[in-house]
Image: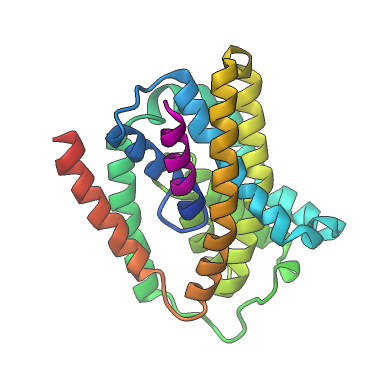
Amino acid sequence: MTWIDSIILGVIEGITEFLPISSTGHLILASTLLGLETTPFLTSFQIAIQLGAIAAVVLLYWKSFLDFPFLTKLFVAFLPTGLVGFLVYPYVKGYLLGNPMVVVVSLFVGGVILIIFELIHKEKPESLEGVKQITYAQALLVGCFQSIAIIPGVSRSAATIIGGLIAGMRRVTIVEFSFLLAVPTMVAATGYDLLKSGASFSFDDIGLLALGFVTAFIVAVFSMRFLIAIVKRYTFIPFGIYRIVLAILFFFIILY
């Protein structure tokens, strides 16, 4: 991996982390296009770089992390993913991360589900508005949906958004809650991976990771604002179409 590769992947991560199109999937597909060898460092990079985008959430929503009652709900939402991630981490890193076919299938199926869900889902007038009004039951349901996103290509954002809409939240509410839930989720995922693999990183590896982190952070600040503006006006159907088109393109261009 070169410095240019790190910047490219950082930009991709910053743009895609909070959109329902799978940042991990895009990183895997982009790494394949760039001709990067699937090494333990690359898979760790694809996990850890997401923390750069997550840092943008802390910058923009820092007041929410000072509200203890809300933090307890965030912790409840994190529990399913934390448990699933702990149990299957070796399998995910060893067999799923770095596998373009898994990403292509997940992108395609997820895109179809997103479109169908939007066509049948109707937001009710009494839908919950405001992240601090979320109940523990709703938080747990969203967390269960998020745990599905441990499969590359599913999209943590898409899974939590669908879960939140099913739980009766308004679009802007679940999108903001998805932002906030990403913080403990990615801190735990990155911390666990670095604990397992960090000692093997060289000085150059650390530099590449730092560059990707900073790039993802800067880009993510703008992409978060973009998503909030989009959900106030449109459905997620365009993202579903994008997922399907991207999956088909990569199936023929990269895999065959």
**Residue 87, x across and y down, in percent:** 57, 27
Does the image show residue 205? yes
**Colouring of the image:** rainbow
Indicate the quadrant containing the C terminus: top left, top right, bottom left or bottom right.
top left
- Magenta region includes residue 129: no
Name the spot of residue 18 as percent of width and height, x first: 52, 56
- For the question of whether residue 169 can be seen, the reply is no
Q: Outermost residue, bottom direction?
A: 125
In the image, is residue 2 part of the stretch drawn in magenta? yes
User: Which quadrant would the N terminus be assigned to in this image?
Assistant: top left
Count of number-bearing discs: 0
Give the residue at x 54% y 57%.
160
Query: What span is in magenta?
Result: 1-12
Q: Indicate whether 73 appears above or below 192.
A: below
Q: Please name whichever residue, 77 or 226, is drawn nearer the observer in this view of the structure.
A: 226
Could you tell me which residue is drawn at 71 percent across and 67 percent down?
A: 134
| 88 versus 14 height, above or below | above
Q: Residue furthest top?
A: 200
- 42 or 212: which is nearer to us? 212
In the foreground, 72 or 250: 250
Does residue 98 appear left or right of residue 221 in this picture?
left
Magenta: main secondary structure equals helix
Name the residue at 60% across, 49% down: 217
Q: Quadrant of residue 34?
A: top left
Is residue 252 shown above or below 60? Answer: above
